[in-house]
Image: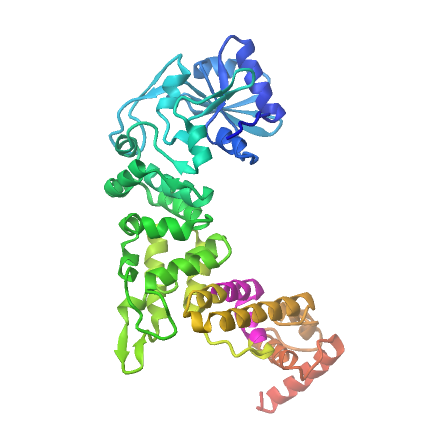
Amino acid sequence: MTLLRITPPAPVQLALERLTSAGYSAYIVGGCVRDALRGEIPHDWDCTTSARPEQAAACFPDYHVIETGLKHGTITVVIDRMPIEITTYRIDGSYADHRRPDSVTFTDRLEDDLARRDFTVNAMAYHLARGLIDCWHGADDLKAGRISCVGDPAARFEEDGLRILRAMRFASVLGFAIAPATADAVHEKKELLHHISAERIQTELTKLLCGRDAERVLTEFSDVLFTVLPELAPMLGFDQHNPHHDYDVWIHTLKTVSAVPPEPVLRWAALLHDSGKPHIFTQDERGGHFYRHAEVSVQIAQKVLKALKTDRKTYDRVLLLTEMHDMVWNGTEKQMKRTVRRIGADAVRELLLLHRGDVSAQAEIHRAERTAEADRLIGMLDELVSAAVPMTLRDLAVTGGDLLRIGFPQGREIGRCLNALLDRVTDGSLPNESDALLKAAKEIRKEHENGAF
Protein backbone atom coordinates (compact mmCIF):
# COMPACT_ATOMS: atom_id res chain seq x y z
CA MET A 1 0.00 0.00 0.00
CA THR A 2 1.12 3.57 -0.58
CA LEU A 3 1.87 4.98 2.83
CA LEU A 4 0.27 8.30 3.53
CA ARG A 5 1.95 11.09 5.39
CA ILE A 6 0.14 11.46 8.70
CA THR A 7 -0.55 14.96 9.94
CA PRO A 8 -1.95 14.84 13.47
CA PRO A 9 -4.13 17.67 14.79
CA ALA A 10 -2.28 20.67 16.26
CA PRO A 11 -2.82 19.59 19.93
CA VAL A 12 -1.23 16.19 19.18
CA GLN A 13 1.70 17.80 17.40
CA LEU A 14 2.17 20.10 20.37
CA ALA A 15 2.22 17.13 22.76
CA LEU A 16 4.84 15.34 20.66
CA GLU A 17 6.95 18.48 20.40
CA ARG A 18 6.83 19.07 24.16
CA LEU A 19 8.09 15.55 24.80
CA THR A 20 10.82 15.60 22.16
CA SER A 21 12.05 19.07 23.13
CA ALA A 22 12.49 17.74 26.68
CA GLY A 23 14.81 15.04 25.33
CA TYR A 24 12.40 12.11 25.09
CA SER A 25 11.32 10.12 22.05
CA ALA A 26 7.62 10.21 21.25
CA TYR A 27 5.31 8.74 18.60
CA ILE A 28 1.66 8.45 17.79
CA VAL A 29 0.71 4.80 18.05
CA GLY A 30 -1.98 2.16 17.65
CA GLY A 31 -5.45 2.70 16.25
CA CYS A 32 -4.88 6.30 15.17
CA VAL A 33 -1.97 5.20 12.94
CA ARG A 34 -4.04 2.34 11.54
CA ASP A 35 -6.99 4.59 10.73
CA ALA A 36 -4.87 7.39 9.31
CA LEU A 37 -3.07 4.97 6.97
CA ARG A 38 -6.48 3.80 5.76
CA GLY A 39 -7.36 7.39 4.91
CA GLU A 40 -9.82 7.76 7.76
CA ILE A 41 -9.93 10.44 10.46
CA PRO A 42 -8.98 8.86 13.81
CA HIS A 43 -11.42 9.30 16.68
CA ASP A 44 -8.68 9.21 19.30
CA TRP A 45 -4.99 10.07 19.18
CA ASP A 46 -2.67 8.10 21.46
CA CYS A 47 1.02 8.73 22.01
CA THR A 48 3.81 6.57 23.34
CA THR A 49 7.06 7.91 24.77
CA SER A 50 10.30 7.02 26.48
CA ALA A 51 9.41 9.48 29.26
CA ARG A 52 8.24 7.98 32.55
CA PRO A 53 4.73 9.09 33.59
CA GLU A 54 5.95 11.75 36.00
CA GLN A 55 8.44 13.01 33.41
CA ALA A 56 5.75 13.18 30.76
CA ALA A 57 3.41 15.06 33.10
CA ALA A 58 6.17 17.57 33.88
CA CYS A 59 6.25 18.52 30.18
CA PHE A 60 2.75 20.00 30.46
CA PRO A 61 2.72 22.35 33.47
CA ASP A 62 0.29 24.68 31.70
CA TYR A 63 -2.25 22.00 30.74
CA HIS A 64 -4.66 19.81 32.64
CA VAL A 65 -3.06 16.41 33.26
CA ILE A 66 -5.16 13.41 34.33
CA GLU A 67 -3.41 10.50 36.02
CA THR A 68 -5.26 7.93 33.92
CA GLY A 69 -3.29 4.87 34.98
CA LEU A 70 0.09 5.62 36.48
CA LYS A 71 0.59 1.96 37.39
CA HIS A 72 0.52 1.13 33.69
CA GLY A 73 2.39 4.27 32.66
CA THR A 74 -0.52 6.28 31.26
CA ILE A 75 -1.49 9.92 31.66
CA THR A 76 -3.99 12.00 29.71
CA VAL A 77 -3.19 15.57 28.73
CA VAL A 78 -6.03 17.88 27.69
CA ILE A 79 -4.88 20.39 25.07
CA ASP A 80 -7.44 22.73 23.50
CA ARG A 81 -10.19 20.45 24.84
CA MET A 82 -8.66 17.40 23.15
CA PRO A 83 -7.72 14.55 25.50
CA ILE A 84 -4.46 12.90 24.43
CA GLU A 85 -3.43 9.65 26.09
CA ILE A 86 0.32 9.32 26.59
CA THR A 87 1.81 6.00 27.68
CA THR A 88 5.39 5.13 28.56
CA TYR A 89 7.11 2.38 26.55
CA ARG A 90 6.53 -0.77 28.56
CA ILE A 91 6.86 -4.53 28.73
CA ASP A 92 3.88 -6.35 30.22
CA GLY A 93 4.30 -9.01 32.87
CA SER A 94 2.15 -12.12 33.27
CA TYR A 95 -1.65 -12.00 32.92
CA ALA A 96 -3.05 -14.09 35.78
CA ASP A 97 -6.63 -12.97 35.13
CA HIS A 98 -6.41 -13.25 31.31
CA ARG A 99 -7.31 -9.57 31.07
CA ARG A 100 -4.69 -7.17 32.49
CA PRO A 101 -0.96 -7.55 33.20
CA ASP A 102 -0.06 -8.19 36.83
CA SER A 103 2.85 -5.79 36.43
CA VAL A 104 4.55 -3.65 33.81
CA THR A 105 8.20 -2.77 33.32
CA PHE A 106 9.09 0.52 31.70
CA THR A 107 11.59 0.35 28.87
CA ASP A 108 13.50 2.77 26.67
CA ARG A 109 12.81 0.77 23.49
CA LEU A 110 9.82 1.48 21.30
CA GLU A 111 10.22 -1.99 19.75
CA ASP A 112 9.55 -3.60 23.14
CA ASP A 113 6.34 -1.61 23.48
CA LEU A 114 5.06 -2.53 20.03
CA ALA A 115 5.74 -6.22 20.71
CA ARG A 116 3.22 -6.30 23.57
CA ARG A 117 0.29 -5.13 21.44
CA ASP A 118 -2.57 -7.27 20.17
CA PHE A 119 -2.67 -7.13 16.36
CA THR A 120 -0.13 -6.07 13.78
CA VAL A 121 -2.39 -3.34 12.42
CA ASN A 122 -2.46 -1.85 15.93
CA ALA A 123 1.28 -2.24 16.50
CA MET A 124 2.50 0.57 14.26
CA ALA A 125 3.97 3.87 15.44
CA TYR A 126 4.53 7.08 13.50
CA HIS A 127 7.11 9.81 14.02
CA LEU A 128 6.66 13.22 12.46
CA ALA A 129 10.24 13.15 11.15
CA ARG A 130 11.12 9.41 10.96
CA GLY A 131 7.81 8.29 9.51
CA LEU A 132 6.30 4.84 10.04
CA ILE A 133 7.79 2.34 12.50
CA ASP A 134 6.36 -1.07 11.57
CA CYS A 135 8.22 -3.92 13.24
CA TRP A 136 5.38 -6.44 12.76
CA HIS A 137 4.41 -5.66 9.14
CA GLY A 138 1.07 -4.15 10.06
CA ALA A 139 1.06 -2.11 6.84
CA ASP A 140 1.23 -5.33 4.84
CA ASP A 141 -1.75 -6.70 6.76
CA LEU A 142 -3.65 -3.46 6.17
CA LYS A 143 -3.01 -3.79 2.44
CA ALA A 144 -4.09 -7.45 2.49
CA GLY A 145 -7.18 -6.74 4.62
CA ARG A 146 -6.02 -9.12 7.31
CA ILE A 147 -6.14 -9.29 11.12
CA SER A 148 -3.05 -11.03 12.52
CA CYS A 149 -1.85 -11.25 16.08
CA VAL A 150 1.53 -9.88 17.05
CA GLY A 151 3.65 -12.97 17.58
CA ASP A 152 1.99 -16.16 18.83
CA PRO A 153 -1.83 -15.81 18.60
CA ALA A 154 -2.50 -18.30 21.41
CA ALA A 155 -0.16 -16.40 23.74
CA ARG A 156 -1.79 -13.08 22.87
CA PHE A 157 -5.24 -14.47 23.70
CA GLU A 158 -4.02 -16.13 26.89
CA GLU A 159 -2.83 -12.71 28.02
CA ASP A 160 -6.16 -11.01 27.32
CA GLY A 161 -9.21 -13.06 26.38
CA LEU A 162 -11.07 -9.98 25.18
CA ARG A 163 -8.71 -9.90 22.20
CA ILE A 164 -10.69 -12.84 20.80
CA LEU A 165 -13.76 -10.66 20.37
CA ARG A 166 -11.61 -7.71 19.32
CA ALA A 167 -10.23 -9.77 16.43
CA MET A 168 -13.77 -10.60 15.35
CA ARG A 169 -14.88 -7.00 15.83
CA PHE A 170 -12.05 -5.59 13.70
CA ALA A 171 -12.78 -8.16 11.00
CA SER A 172 -16.44 -7.15 10.97
CA VAL A 173 -15.95 -3.38 11.14
CA LEU A 174 -13.02 -3.17 8.71
CA GLY A 175 -14.24 -5.91 6.39
CA PHE A 176 -10.99 -7.83 6.96
CA ALA A 177 -10.28 -11.55 7.07
CA ILE A 178 -8.72 -13.10 10.16
CA ALA A 179 -5.39 -14.74 9.31
CA PRO A 180 -5.50 -18.55 9.52
CA ALA A 181 -3.24 -18.94 12.56
CA THR A 182 -5.08 -16.19 14.40
CA ALA A 183 -8.47 -17.66 13.40
CA ASP A 184 -7.42 -21.07 14.69
CA ALA A 185 -6.49 -19.54 18.03
CA VAL A 186 -9.80 -17.65 18.19
CA HIS A 187 -11.63 -20.98 18.04
CA GLU A 188 -9.17 -22.78 20.29
CA LYS A 189 -9.08 -20.16 23.06
CA LYS A 190 -12.75 -19.11 23.08
CA GLU A 191 -13.31 -20.39 26.64
CA LEU A 192 -11.07 -17.58 27.87
CA LEU A 193 -14.04 -15.28 27.28
CA HIS A 194 -15.52 -16.62 30.53
CA HIS A 195 -12.90 -14.52 32.33
CA ILE A 196 -14.12 -11.28 30.72
CA SER A 197 -16.67 -8.92 32.27
CA ALA A 198 -20.16 -8.76 30.79
CA GLU A 199 -19.85 -5.03 30.09
CA ARG A 200 -16.76 -5.47 27.94
CA ILE A 201 -18.27 -8.39 26.05
CA GLN A 202 -21.39 -6.35 25.37
CA THR A 203 -19.33 -3.42 24.07
CA GLU A 204 -17.34 -5.60 21.67
CA LEU A 205 -20.38 -7.55 20.47
CA THR A 206 -22.30 -4.36 19.75
CA LYS A 207 -19.45 -2.99 17.63
CA LEU A 208 -19.14 -6.37 15.89
CA LEU A 209 -22.87 -6.52 15.16
CA CYS A 210 -22.79 -3.03 13.68
CA GLY A 211 -19.87 -3.85 11.41
CA ARG A 212 -20.18 -4.19 7.66
CA ASP A 213 -19.24 -7.88 7.73
CA ALA A 214 -21.12 -9.06 10.82
CA GLU A 215 -22.88 -11.83 8.89
CA ARG A 216 -19.63 -13.29 7.55
CA VAL A 217 -17.77 -13.09 10.87
CA LEU A 218 -20.61 -14.59 12.90
CA THR A 219 -21.02 -17.36 10.36
CA GLU A 220 -17.34 -18.27 10.59
CA PHE A 221 -17.11 -17.84 14.36
CA SER A 222 -20.59 -18.81 15.55
CA ASP A 223 -19.02 -21.19 18.09
CA VAL A 224 -17.27 -18.22 19.71
CA LEU A 225 -20.49 -16.22 19.94
CA PHE A 226 -22.30 -19.18 21.47
CA THR A 227 -19.59 -19.39 24.13
CA VAL A 228 -20.78 -16.07 25.55
CA LEU A 229 -24.41 -16.31 24.36
CA PRO A 230 -25.29 -20.03 24.66
CA GLU A 231 -28.99 -19.17 24.45
CA LEU A 232 -28.55 -18.61 20.70
CA ALA A 233 -26.90 -21.94 19.91
CA PRO A 234 -30.17 -23.87 19.25
CA MET A 235 -30.75 -21.71 16.16
CA LEU A 236 -27.69 -23.12 14.39
CA GLY A 237 -28.75 -25.56 11.67
CA PHE A 238 -32.41 -25.56 12.79
CA ASP A 239 -34.38 -26.32 9.61
CA GLN A 240 -37.63 -24.33 9.50
CA HIS A 241 -39.45 -26.82 7.22
CA ASN A 242 -41.50 -23.88 6.02
CA PRO A 243 -42.21 -22.70 2.44
CA HIS A 244 -41.77 -19.09 3.57
CA HIS A 245 -38.12 -19.70 4.47
CA ASP A 246 -35.15 -20.79 2.40
CA TYR A 247 -32.69 -20.73 5.31
CA ASP A 248 -32.34 -22.37 8.71
CA VAL A 249 -33.06 -20.16 11.72
CA TRP A 250 -29.43 -19.14 12.28
CA ILE A 251 -28.66 -18.23 8.66
CA HIS A 252 -31.97 -16.34 8.45
CA THR A 253 -31.05 -14.48 11.63
CA LEU A 254 -27.62 -13.44 10.37
CA LYS A 255 -29.04 -12.31 7.04
CA THR A 256 -31.61 -10.25 8.92
CA VAL A 257 -28.81 -8.69 10.98
CA SER A 258 -26.95 -7.64 7.85
CA ALA A 259 -30.15 -6.34 6.22
CA VAL A 260 -31.07 -3.80 8.92
CA PRO A 261 -29.24 -0.48 9.37
CA PRO A 262 -26.07 -0.73 11.51
CA GLU A 263 -27.63 0.73 14.62
CA PRO A 264 -27.19 -1.10 17.96
CA VAL A 265 -30.91 -1.45 18.78
CA LEU A 266 -31.78 -2.79 15.34
CA ARG A 267 -28.83 -5.16 15.13
CA TRP A 268 -29.51 -6.62 18.59
CA ALA A 269 -33.22 -6.96 17.81
CA ALA A 270 -32.38 -8.71 14.54
CA LEU A 271 -30.02 -11.10 16.35
CA LEU A 272 -32.63 -12.00 18.97
CA HIS A 273 -35.95 -11.75 17.13
CA ASP A 274 -36.25 -15.46 16.22
CA SER A 275 -34.24 -16.94 19.10
CA GLY A 276 -37.39 -18.58 20.47
CA LYS A 277 -38.20 -20.54 17.32
CA PRO A 278 -36.32 -23.79 18.11
CA HIS A 279 -38.15 -24.03 21.44
CA ILE A 280 -41.74 -23.98 20.13
CA PHE A 281 -41.44 -25.76 16.77
CA THR A 282 -44.35 -27.89 15.60
CA GLN A 283 -44.89 -29.60 12.27
CA ASP A 284 -47.88 -30.93 10.33
CA GLU A 285 -48.77 -31.65 6.73
CA ARG A 286 -48.47 -27.94 5.89
CA GLY A 287 -44.89 -27.72 7.20
CA GLY A 288 -43.16 -26.25 10.22
CA HIS A 289 -44.81 -23.73 12.54
CA PHE A 290 -43.53 -21.39 15.23
CA TYR A 291 -46.70 -20.16 16.89
CA ARG A 292 -46.11 -17.45 19.52
CA HIS A 293 -42.36 -17.67 19.04
CA ALA A 294 -42.03 -13.93 19.69
CA GLU A 295 -43.01 -14.50 23.32
CA VAL A 296 -40.22 -17.02 23.83
CA SER A 297 -37.81 -14.80 21.92
CA VAL A 298 -38.59 -11.98 24.35
CA GLN A 299 -37.81 -14.26 27.30
CA ILE A 300 -34.46 -15.22 25.74
CA ALA A 301 -33.72 -11.59 24.89
CA GLN A 302 -34.39 -10.59 28.48
CA LYS A 303 -31.92 -13.20 29.72
CA VAL A 304 -29.24 -12.26 27.19
CA LEU A 305 -29.51 -8.49 27.62
CA LYS A 306 -29.59 -8.68 31.40
CA ALA A 307 -26.55 -10.96 31.46
CA LEU A 308 -24.69 -8.45 29.28
CA LYS A 309 -25.80 -5.58 31.56
CA THR A 310 -27.29 -3.69 28.65
CA ASP A 311 -28.46 -0.15 29.36
CA ARG A 312 -32.15 0.22 30.14
CA LYS A 313 -33.08 2.24 27.05
CA THR A 314 -31.58 -0.33 24.68
CA TYR A 315 -33.00 -3.20 26.73
CA ASP A 316 -36.56 -1.85 26.59
CA ARG A 317 -36.49 -1.03 22.89
CA VAL A 318 -34.97 -4.36 21.81
CA LEU A 319 -37.60 -6.23 23.82
CA LEU A 320 -40.37 -4.13 22.25
CA LEU A 321 -39.11 -4.80 18.72
CA THR A 322 -38.65 -8.49 19.45
CA GLU A 323 -42.17 -8.75 20.87
CA MET A 324 -43.79 -6.96 17.92
CA HIS A 325 -41.57 -8.09 15.03
CA ASP A 326 -44.07 -10.66 13.79
CA MET A 327 -47.13 -8.40 13.70
CA VAL A 328 -49.18 -8.56 10.52
CA TRP A 329 -49.30 -5.27 8.63
CA ASN A 330 -52.50 -4.71 6.66
CA GLY A 331 -51.06 -1.78 4.70
CA THR A 332 -53.52 0.87 5.89
CA GLU A 333 -52.87 4.33 7.30
CA LYS A 334 -55.32 3.57 10.07
CA GLN A 335 -53.19 0.71 11.37
CA MET A 336 -50.05 2.80 10.97
CA LYS A 337 -51.51 5.68 12.97
CA ARG A 338 -52.74 3.40 15.73
CA THR A 339 -49.36 1.69 15.98
CA VAL A 340 -47.61 5.06 16.21
CA ARG A 341 -50.10 6.06 18.87
CA ARG A 342 -49.21 2.95 20.84
CA ILE A 343 -45.41 3.00 20.69
CA GLY A 344 -44.34 6.25 19.00
CA ALA A 345 -43.11 7.11 15.50
CA ASP A 346 -39.44 6.35 16.20
CA ALA A 347 -40.22 2.87 17.50
CA VAL A 348 -42.55 2.16 14.57
CA ARG A 349 -39.84 3.17 12.11
CA GLU A 350 -37.41 0.76 13.79
CA LEU A 351 -40.08 -1.94 13.78
CA LEU A 352 -40.62 -1.46 10.05
CA LEU A 353 -36.87 -1.54 9.37
CA LEU A 354 -36.64 -4.79 11.33
CA HIS A 355 -39.66 -6.10 9.40
CA ARG A 356 -37.99 -5.19 6.11
CA GLY A 357 -34.78 -6.97 7.15
CA ASP A 358 -36.79 -9.99 8.28
CA VAL A 359 -38.74 -10.43 5.03
CA SER A 360 -35.62 -9.82 2.92
CA ALA A 361 -34.13 -12.92 4.55
CA GLN A 362 -37.15 -15.14 3.88
CA ALA A 363 -37.98 -17.32 0.85
CA GLU A 364 -36.81 -15.89 -2.46
CA ILE A 365 -40.20 -16.51 -4.05
CA HIS A 366 -41.79 -13.83 -1.84
CA ARG A 367 -38.72 -11.71 -1.10
CA ALA A 368 -39.05 -8.93 -3.69
CA GLU A 369 -42.78 -8.48 -3.13
CA ARG A 370 -42.56 -8.37 0.65
CA THR A 371 -39.52 -6.11 0.69
CA ALA A 372 -41.26 -3.68 -1.65
CA GLU A 373 -44.31 -3.63 0.62
CA ALA A 374 -42.08 -2.96 3.64
CA ASP A 375 -40.51 -0.07 1.75
CA ARG A 376 -43.99 1.27 0.97
CA LEU A 377 -44.92 1.14 4.66
CA ILE A 378 -41.76 2.98 5.65
CA GLY A 379 -42.57 5.60 3.03
CA MET A 380 -46.12 5.88 4.38
CA LEU A 381 -44.82 6.50 7.89
CA ASP A 382 -42.33 9.09 6.66
CA GLU A 383 -45.09 10.92 4.78
CA LEU A 384 -47.38 10.96 7.82
CA VAL A 385 -44.60 12.28 10.02
CA SER A 386 -43.53 14.90 7.45
CA ALA A 387 -47.12 16.07 7.07
CA ALA A 388 -47.42 16.36 10.86
CA VAL A 389 -50.48 14.12 10.79
CA PRO A 390 -51.67 13.78 14.41
CA MET A 391 -51.01 10.28 15.69
CA THR A 392 -50.28 10.74 19.41
CA LEU A 393 -51.85 12.75 22.22
CA ARG A 394 -49.11 15.37 22.05
CA ASP A 395 -50.07 15.96 18.41
CA LEU A 396 -53.57 17.10 19.35
CA ALA A 397 -54.36 20.80 19.02
CA VAL A 398 -55.71 20.77 22.60
CA THR A 399 -54.19 19.69 25.90
CA GLY A 400 -55.43 18.61 29.28
CA GLY A 401 -55.06 22.21 30.42
CA ASP A 402 -57.46 23.32 27.71
CA LEU A 403 -60.05 20.82 28.97
CA LEU A 404 -59.61 22.08 32.54
CA ARG A 405 -60.32 25.60 31.34
CA ILE A 406 -63.68 24.56 29.86
CA GLY A 407 -64.80 22.92 33.07
CA PHE A 408 -63.42 19.39 33.05
CA PRO A 409 -62.52 18.16 36.54
CA GLN A 410 -58.99 16.95 37.19
CA GLY A 411 -58.57 13.20 36.94
CA ARG A 412 -59.01 10.31 34.58
CA GLU A 413 -61.89 11.93 32.70
CA ILE A 414 -59.43 14.24 30.96
CA GLY A 415 -57.29 11.35 29.74
CA ARG A 416 -60.34 9.41 28.51
CA CYS A 417 -61.59 12.46 26.65
CA LEU A 418 -58.24 13.19 25.00
CA ASN A 419 -57.99 9.60 23.83
CA ALA A 420 -61.53 9.75 22.46
CA LEU A 421 -60.66 12.93 20.58
CA LEU A 422 -57.53 11.32 19.16
CA ASP A 423 -59.59 8.32 18.04
CA ARG A 424 -61.80 10.61 15.99
CA VAL A 425 -58.90 12.61 14.58
CA THR A 426 -57.04 9.42 13.66
CA ASP A 427 -60.14 8.03 11.94
CA GLY A 428 -60.58 11.28 10.04
CA SER A 429 -64.01 12.04 11.51
CA LEU A 430 -62.79 15.13 13.39
CA PRO A 431 -60.35 17.85 12.26
CA ASN A 432 -57.35 18.52 14.46
CA GLU A 433 -58.42 22.09 15.17
CA SER A 434 -58.76 23.63 18.61
CA ASP A 435 -62.32 24.91 18.25
CA ALA A 436 -63.60 21.67 16.77
CA LEU A 437 -61.83 19.59 19.42
CA LEU A 438 -63.14 21.68 22.31
CA LYS A 439 -66.66 21.50 20.90
CA ALA A 440 -66.35 17.73 20.60
CA ALA A 441 -64.91 17.54 24.12
CA LYS A 442 -67.99 19.27 25.54
CA GLU A 443 -70.21 16.80 23.71
CA ILE A 444 -68.16 13.90 25.03
CA ARG A 445 -68.52 15.24 28.55
CA LYS A 446 -72.28 15.47 28.17
CA GLU A 447 -72.31 11.87 26.95
CA HIS A 448 -70.30 10.93 30.02
CA GLU A 449 -72.73 12.69 32.33
CA ASN A 450 -75.59 10.85 30.62
CA GLY A 451 -73.78 7.55 31.03
CA ALA A 452 -73.01 7.09 27.32
CA PHE A 453 -69.25 7.68 27.52
What is the quadrant of residue 73 in the picture?
Answer: top left
Relative depth, front residue between 369 and 340: 369
Residue 353 picture location, percent across and down: 51, 63
Part of the protein shown in magenta: 336-354
Residue 150 picture location, percent across and down: 34, 28
Residue 10 visible to the viewer: yes
Left or right: residue 182 versus residue 430 is left
Residue 43 picture location, percent across and down: 54, 35
Left or right: residue 274 versus residue 283 is right
Q: Residue at x 56, y 27 (%)?
A: 4
Residue 332 picture location, percent across and down: 58, 79
Q: Residue at x 48, y 58 (%)?
A: 260
What is the quadrant of residue 124 in the picture?
Answer: top left
Q: Is residue 413 magenta?
A: no
Relative depth, front residue between 171 and 431: 171
Q: Residue at x 35, y 24 (%)?
A: 116
